[in-house]
Structures are given as structure tokens and as C-alpha cells.
């Protein structure tokens, strides 16, 4: 019995490790295009608005499809959704290299959003199946570090490859590597036993549409969920602004080459987030045992602390101060990110976790990530890119307001409802 429990304990963390590798490519693939913005601008003669559309096309498709992806994940094997999603988005990433015009490139970017949309609802539900409330934030916080490493790798290596071999090879290398990883992991990743609630079945007699609508209706009746979705929309807006436009900002203002611009735009913020996410997960697990809104409090600290550093990122003319701003913003972002889904899962039934993650991604990416690159591209034409980036800090303050409202008025009641 003890040996079996030890093996199960090791495997549940091995699952996090395998998902970490898949998530790495999930973010490296999507970040690669931002590192080669200057090359695309020159070769395809793109404007700042068209560059913004490239970022927004992915996010809009991702957000629209995430709503359906979450419902699908609650009805199928999550392992299958994760691995087939990996194969699809990796293949699309490789195919992006065939683009010869802006509409073609725009179409492939949108299609990649479709390919990646299943991953986070399925992976978050899978991790929750293996990790109870006592370790959930830590497991998700550890998994979240893959986002940061993948973003850094996507920015640096896409810029480096593009600088020496052309931007097309960046997509071939990342997409091909993702497919190889999937082939290796396929035999080791397993579905947890009956982790979505007693009596859960992949199919329901009431039909998939009716079942999905009931799940979404249940989520939308939770005030805490609504506040968390509002906060995620705002936080994701700021994150996508910095990830999509910072490489070009560094290339233009500080005259860095493509590889160094892609690296500097990501490495300081992402490494700091790698430190902040595990700390945020541990702190949230600890505070959650002492107060109902413990996870939300950690998230609120993250967005309020990050706002002034977003301003500094856009306004400074010193590379040293920019590094400081990116580092502290990244650490604060990690505190928030570690609890994005753990906070929601506290106040909903287990069988709706996939739908909840899908709904969160729809709101966050459609309303936040989908509008951010294009909004900044438009503002940059009249105010300059630095000022446009700094203006995004106000959106962080709105995220904090949503979290404080949930803590003050709703989270205790919603927790009690789930317990009953």
C-alpha cells in the first residue's frame, strides 16, 4: 500500500513534468512571430496595424474556440485532447513557413489559435484530477513556469534563427520539435481515474449542446467566477501587450538586433515570473487554508504591484531601468498567474473544470488578448509605442478592482455553496 501511494505521488508530479514540455511549445510557437516582426515588416511591407492584426488574429481565434474547447474537454479523454492538439498546432506552425502574402500569414496565425485552444482547458483539468486542493496551486504554479521558459525560447531562438536563416525556418524548427515531443510522450501520459466527480461520463443522455449550456449557465451564476473572468481579461490584455510589442520596442528604441531584442523582451520578465509563480502558488495554498479569498488576495497583490512597472517599461529611455521594470513586472505577474485556474476551481464543481477553463480563455483572449496587439498598434500611430505600452497599466488596476470585489462580497458564499 505504501509503495503504491509513493508511486502515485511520484506520477502525479511526472504528469506536471510532461505537460510542462507540451506547454513549452504551446508558448514558444505563439511567441515566435513577435520576434520576427521587423523581418515581416520589411519583407511583406507591413504596417504597425497589420502587425497588430497578426497578434490579434491568433488571440481572437483562440478566444472564440476556447468556449467550445472547454465543453469538449469535459466530455472526452483529456490526454487525447492534449496530444492531438499538440500535433495540430505544431503542423500549422510548420505550414506557416509557406506564407508568401499577408493574408496567408494572417490565416496561418489564426489557424494556430484554433490548434492550441484545447490545451489549457484539458491540461488544467488533468492536473486538478491528480492534485487535490492541498497541492493544486503549487502544481499549477510549477506548470506555469513552462509558459515563461517557452516564451523566452520562442523570442530568442526565433529571432536568432530568423537573423541567420530567415524567419520561415523559425516556424519549421519549433513546429517540428513539438511533433517529436508528442510522439515521445504519447505512451506515458495517462488519464486519472474518476477525477471529474462521481458518476461523470464522457457522454450525457441530454446531448452535448444541452449539457454544455447547463455547465456554462452554472458557471455564469457564480459571482466569483464572473469577477475572476473580468480580472483575467484585464491581466491578459497587459500580458499580451508586453509580449507582442516589446521585441519591436527594443529593436526600434534601443537598436538591438533581432535575437537580442527577442531575448531581452522576454528573459527578464519570464525568469522573474518563474520565481513568482511557485512563490504565488505556495503562498496561495497557505492563505487559502486561513481565509476564503486567500488565492484572490495573492492575485490582487500581483496586479497592483505590477502596474507601475508597466508604466516604467513604456516610458524609460534607459536600458537598465527597462530591465528593472521588466523584472519586477514579471515577478508580480507570476504571483497572479499561478492562481488563474486554481481560484476558479475552488468555487465550481469538479465536472465543470474544463468548461470553466475554456470560458476563462474565451473571455481573456477574446476580450483581452484579442484586442491588445491591435489596440496598441493603433495607439502607437498617434502617441508612439512607448506611451501606448505605458497606458496599458490602467487595465491592470481594473483587474485588481475585480479581485477585491470578489474577495469582499462573493467568494465566501460561493465556497460554501460548493461545499454543500
Image (tube, rainbow, N blue to C red):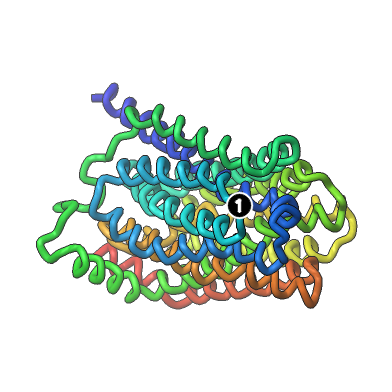
Horizontal side of residue 216 vs 282, given as left or right = left
Say if 328 sits above or below 175 in the image: below
Circle 1: element type: loop
Judging depth in this view, the residue of 57 and 75 nearest the camera is: 57
Q: Is residue 134 visible?
A: no
Q: Quadrant of the C terminus?
A: bottom left
Left or right: residue 220 versus residue 94 is left
Q: Is residue 28 shown above or below 371?
A: above
Q: Residues within 10 Å of mark 1 (few under 14, many from 20)?
A: few
Instruction: Identify the residue at the far top of this view.
Output: 3
**Residue 313 quadrant:** bottom right
Q: Residue at x 77, y 47 (%)?
A: 261
Q: Is residue 163 left or right of residue 142?
A: right
The residue to which callout 1 is attached is 100
Foreground pick, 74 / 274? 74
Q: Is residue 315 above or below residue 173?
A: below
Q: Can you give x and y, in whole percent of width and height, for residue 120 in the image? A: 42, 51
Relative image position of residue 134 (x, y in whole percent): 40, 46
Image quadrant holding the N terminus, namely top left
Q: Residue furthest left?
A: 205
Residue at the right extreme? 318
Point 62% across, 56% down: residue:
333
Q: Position of residue 316 (x, y in %)?
A: 86, 62
Residue 65 makes an appearance in the image:
yes
Q: Is residue 404 above or below residue 101?
A: below
The one of 297 and 62 positioned closer to us in this rendering: 62
Identify the residue shown where x is 32% and y is 41%: 79
Q: Where's residue 111, x and y in %?
A: 46, 55
Amino acid at each position: 500500500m505504501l509503495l503504491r501511494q509513493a508511486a502515485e505521488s511520484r506520477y502525479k508530479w511526472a504528469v506536471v513534468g510532461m505537460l510542462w514540455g507540451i506547454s513549452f511549445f504551446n508558448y514558444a510557437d505563439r511567441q515566435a512571430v513577435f520576434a520576427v516582426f521587423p523581418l515581416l515588416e520589411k519583407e511583406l511591407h507591413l504596417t504597425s496595424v497589420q502587425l497588430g492584426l497578426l497578434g490579434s488574429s491568433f488571440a481572437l481565434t483562440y478566444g472564440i474556440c476556447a468556449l467550445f474547447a472547454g465543453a469538449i474537454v469535459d466530455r472526452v479523454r483529456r490526454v487525447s485532447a492534449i496530444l492531438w492538439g499538440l500535433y495540430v498546432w505544431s503542423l500549422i506552425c510548420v505550414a506557416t513557413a509557406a506564407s508568401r502574402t499577408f493574408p496567408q500569414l494572417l490565416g496561418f496565425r489564426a489557424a494556430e489559435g484554433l490548434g492550441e485552444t484545447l490545451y489549457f482547458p484539458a491540461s488544467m483539468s488533468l492536473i486538478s484530477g491528480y492534485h487535490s486542493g492541498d497541492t493544486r496551486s503549487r502544481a499549477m504554479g510549477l506548470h506555469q513556469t513552462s509558459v515563461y521558459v517557452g516564451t523566452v525560447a520562442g523570442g530568442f531562438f526565433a529571432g536568432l534563427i530568423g537573423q541567420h536563416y530567415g524567419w520561415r525556418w523559425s516556424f519549421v524548427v519549433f513546429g517540428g520539435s513539438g511533433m517529436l515531443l508528442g510522439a515521445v510522450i504519447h505512451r506515458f501520459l495517462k488519464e486519472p481515474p474518476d477525477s471529474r466527480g462521481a458518476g461523470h461520463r464522457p457522454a450525457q443522455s441530454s446531448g452535448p449542446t444541452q449539457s454544455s449550456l447547463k455547465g456554462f449557465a452554472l458557471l455564469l451564476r457564480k459571482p466569483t467566477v464572473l469577477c475572476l473572468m473580468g480580472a483575467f481579461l484585464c491581466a491578459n490584455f497587459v500580458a499580451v501587450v508586453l509580449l507582442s510589442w516589446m521585441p519591436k520596442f527594443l529593436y526600434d528604441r534601443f537598436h538591438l538586433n533581432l535575437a537580442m531584442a527577442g531575448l531581452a523582451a522576454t528573459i527578464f520578465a519570464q525568469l522573474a515570473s518563474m520565481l513568482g509563480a511557485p512563490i504565488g502558488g505556495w503562498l496561495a495554498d497557505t492563505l487559502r487554508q486561513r481565509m476564503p479569498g486567500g488565492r484572490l488576495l495573492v492575485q490582487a497583490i500581483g496586479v497592483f504591484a505590477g502596474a507601475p512597472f508597466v508604466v516604467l517599461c513604456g516610458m524609460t529611455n534607459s536600458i537598465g531601468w527597462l530591465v528593472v521594470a521588466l523584472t519586477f513586472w514579471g515577478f508580480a505577474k507570476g504571483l497572479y498567474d499561478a492562481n488563474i485556474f486554481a481560484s476558479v476551481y475552488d468555487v465550481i464543481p469538479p465536472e465543470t473544470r474544463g468548461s470553466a477553463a475554456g470560458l476563462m480563455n474565451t473571455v481573456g483572449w477574446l476580450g483581452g488578448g484579442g484586442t491588445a496587439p491591435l489596440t496598441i498598434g493603433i495607439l502607437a500611430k498617434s502617441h508612439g509605442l512607448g506611451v501606448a505600452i505605458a497606458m496599458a497599466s490602467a487595465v491592470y488596476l481594473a483587474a485588481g478592482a475585480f479581485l477585491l470585489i470578489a474577495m469582499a462580497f462573493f467568494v465566501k458564499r460561493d465556497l460554501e455553496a460548493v461545499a454543500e
